[in-house]
Amino acid sequence: MPDNKIVLAFSGGLDTSVAVPWLKEKYGADVITLTIDLGMVDLEFIKERAMQVGAVKALTVDGREPLVQEFLYPALQAGAIYEEQYPLATALGRPLIARYMVEAARAEGAFAVAHGCTGKGNDQVRIEVGVAALAPDIKVIGPIRDWGMSRQEEIEYAEARGIPVNARASRFSVDENIWGRSVEAGELEDPWLQPPEDAYAWTKPLSETPDEPAFLEVHFEQGIPTAIDGEDMSGVDLIPHLNSILGEHGVGRLDHVENRLVGIKSREIYEAPAAVALHAAHKSLEALTLSKDQSRAKARIAQEYADVVYNGLWFTHHRQDLDAYVRSTQRFVTGDVRLRVHKGNCTVVGRSSPYSLYQYKLATYDPGDDYDQAAAEGFITIYGLPVRTQNQAQSQ
């Protein structure tokens, strides 16, 4: 047996299945597969598939809890949504995958890690930059990018080696984790065409959703959701729970033409029911508990944070600095948000917090008003001073 080893991030699909023999033939190496459950994976099935296609060892990891606590919830607190639509489900999973790949390579004594990303996508950047940040001495191999085979050539390659690969044609490319589902390719590549119904799996079409709205209450502690309708839940339970309820009402479908890091535009379909709802609820609670200056500064930080995640720069000091600011803003983002869910829409209809900056006695026009309206005259005089001065001195 050869002494050199390669750890391959393994999904069990066609690309990574044929990558196992390709890596063995090209590098004369033992291939150890690594499959990470980020919320939507049958670990035992994929482990069996890995051994069938020639891996010497098949490693599996349950990464759901680290994904939620270390990646999803910090991004939620930051309000990170790429180009105002994409809640970064796939993008947030990639740095964790890179970290697990490095850990496995160290534990197994591997000289390299490999992935199944194409040369046109963002994920190759996210994984390879992540590995370079954590272990610059480990070689990274991208078999699909390197070999240049078409799907049909991959099937023929597998058949020639007697590899049991599911070659059932699918016109869509799909990636899933607990935070969302990403779909591309097939007729989705024409941005003029409406996405076909079979592009969706988590959400019902509006024609099949309930006629009556549903109401949900989400409790947050320092910007993190901790309970639904009064029931405390861990993130690993809370997010799928919301995905299920909201998906029944058709919430969470996103049709986005986005700017990829590699310089091309791509039409993507996303399903992210829980992410859409939690971002809306979190933002509404921030509106209640953050000052105007905090809210506006944080909106700029949210955009920067989203770009950092999307562009594969998670393992940077810049992201750590952003996290420090975000954590500070979340100290008083505690309270409850009431959501109305109906026919694909998720609307905030109520919010409350023990730290609310909304004061009824200041806002009301009813008796009991504590606001000193007489003070407004002097304020307006001072506030309008530079306007009057400039127009008097520089009138045309």
Image (cartoon, rainbow, N blue to C red):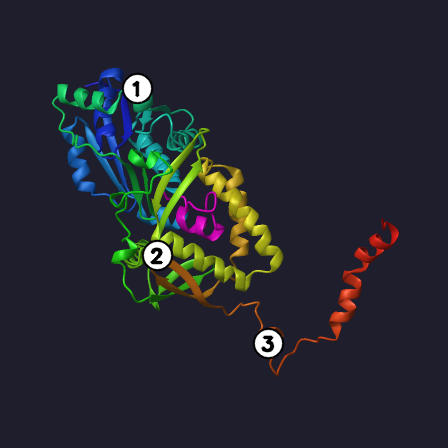
Q: Amino acid at mark 1?
A: Gly
Question: Mark 3 highlights which residue?
Answer: 364
Camera-side residue of 157 and 35: 157
Q: Amino acid at mark 3?
A: Thr
Q: Which residues are magenta?
A: 71-89
Is 191 placed above or below 384 here? Answer: above
Find numbered disc 2 in the image and state the secondary structure of the residue it sits on. loop
Residue furthest to the left in view is 162
Q: Is residue 338 left or right of residue 48?
A: right
Say which quarter of the image contains residue 26.
top left
Q: CA distance from mark 1 to mark 2?
A: 41 Å
For marks 3 and 1 on the same chain, the one whose residue lies earlier in the sequence = 1
Question: Mark 1 highlights which residue?
Answer: 148
Say which quarter of the image contains residue 61.
top left
Q: x and y percent of residue 239 in the render?
A: 33, 55
Is 69 magenta? The answer is no
Find numbered disc 1 in the image and state the secondary structure of the residue it sits on. loop
Q: Is residue 38 visible?
A: yes
Is 83 magenta? The answer is yes
